[in-house]
Image (cartoon, rainbow, N blue to C red):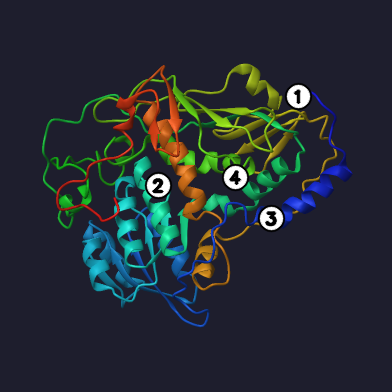
Amino acid sequence: MKGQRLSRREFLQRMAAVAAVVGGAGCTGRGRLRRVAPSETILHACIGASGMAASDLNSITHHPFVKLVAIADVDLPRAEAWRQKFPGVRIYQDWRRLLETEKELDTLNVSTPDHMHAPIAMAALQRGVHVYVQKPLTHDVYETRQLTRVARQKGLVTQMGIQIHSLQEYRLAVALVRSGVIGKVREVHLWSDKDWGDPGPPPQRSDPVPPGLDWDGWLGVAAWRPYIGEGYYHPGNWRRRLDFGTGTLGDMGCHIFDPVFNALALTAPVRVRSEGAAPNAWNWASNARIHYTFPGTAYTAEATLPVTWYDGTQKPPPEVRALIEDEPWPAQGSLCIGTRGVMLLPHIGMPKLFPRKQFEGFHMPGIEGANHYTQFLEAVRGNDRTTAGFDYSGPLTETVLLGCVATHFPQTTLEWDAAALRFKNLSEANAYLRRRYRPSWEVRGL
């Protein structure tokens, strides 16, 4: 971290410029197809009824100009439970029937297991509906590219559910990096102590499907298999399963990569390499360590930027952890190592600058946060722009999912050609970029 310390005057000058644009970093336009006037009510539907879907539903319907007209969930009792709060809401068990029936929808949120994000979102986009989709945007790289293309083509408002993207903490971190307070960034480390791996095979049994659960609908585009109870798939552990979730990296990567991807204006990586265990035939592995190489940008020190992801018990090496002195190591977060200093960003925490002595007396600038859901809804009304629309969150999700693909080929450096949507040096890896949907579950555009 050699180089002159940035003077406070220089910093403030740069911050003034950054603050003017930080709220719009990664934004997408209002959308050429503005279907809702600011004076009108937004007619909204929710796909999913519990877990993150419940949070999304409550946050979206909190706005007085939104009317919830329909909910769909394959676990029908979970959807029916919302009638107490929304007496007039129409309940569906099949999201396809909801989209066929509700002709006047303006907006839809997709809050399901990962494997159904793209099919539902694409079907909604094809009908001209603005969509809010939980992270990761999709299960596969190809799906992400297609959603991004269609949303742009149709001029619809989109937002990926990385709610932390709009918080003050993450916006401040982006502004600090772009201001140059830590200099040009030389390397980045990202981590999560979560573990969505499972080394074993599925139980060899078939359990009775619970009353009210449409198991065929829960499987959706995935290949049919018997139901296994005790939470093996539904509702709690689908993230561990290759066909339904995207492991720890897919779960947390879109959150933790986000401020780094945004602040450094990163584009697609050129190489990715996994040094952890490979998934088995059914489940994601634990304790990943994945190395990405990105093209350099105006905010990086070199022509390329190394970024490493760790999860489970994996952590950056001791010499990296020592850079934050006696600060407790966060369970999840990122560390940007620059030519003039280091920035630690705990997950959902305020950024911290090191060495402490160098930044003694430094006052963090005032950066305001925003409401991620409000931003989406106001963009639909033509009053705002989304900052995690698919033009931004699509490439972000592709980056995360490339790491998931790399875990299938440990100790192998995969060379990525983003324009061609393929790996240049290992054709077997390309098979993991796109799934084949189950017959009768195909969706136009995917």
Q: Residue type at mark 4?
A: Asn
Q: How busy is the neighbourhood of tag 3: few (under 14 within 10 Å), some, or many (20 plus)?
A: few
Disc number lying in front (2 or 1) = 2
Q: Residue type at mark 1?
A: Met
**Contact flag, marks 3 and 4 (Cβ < 8 Å):** no
Disc number lying in front (2 or 4) = 2
Q: Which mark is residue 21?
A: 3
Tell me the residue that label 2 is attached to.
Answer: 145
Task: Give the answer, above or below, for where 116 lies relative to 253.
Answer: below
User: In the picture, which quadrant includes the N terminus?
Assistant: top right
Disc number lying in front (2 or 3) = 2
**Contact flag, marks 4 and 1 (Cβ < 8 Å):** no
Q: CA distance from mark 2 to mark 4?
A: 18 Å
Helix, strand or loop at label 4? It is helix
Q: CA distance from mark 1 to mark 3?
A: 27 Å
Helix, strand or loop at label 2? It is helix
Q: CA distance from mark 4 to mark 1?
A: 22 Å
Q: Earlier in the sequence, mark 3 or mark 4?
A: 3
Q: Residue at x 45, y 39 (%)?
A: 419
Location of residue 432 (image quadrant): top left
Task: Give the answer, above or below, for where 94 lies relative to 272.
Answer: below
Q: Earlier in the sequence, mark 2 or mark 1?
A: 1
Tell me the residue that label 1 is attached to.
Answer: 1
Q: Is residue 58 visible?
A: yes
- In the rendering, at what x and y percent does residue 204 appear? 13, 30
Q: Which mark is residue 288?
A: none
Q: Nearer the viewer, residue 142 or 202?
A: 142
Q: How busy is the neighbourhood of tag 2: few (under 14 within 10 Å), some, or many (20 plus)?
A: some
Q: Residue type at mark 3?
A: Val
Q: Which mark is residue 262?
A: 4
Q: CA distance from mark 3 to mark 4?
A: 12 Å
**Contact flag, marks 2 and 1 (Cβ < 8 Å):** no
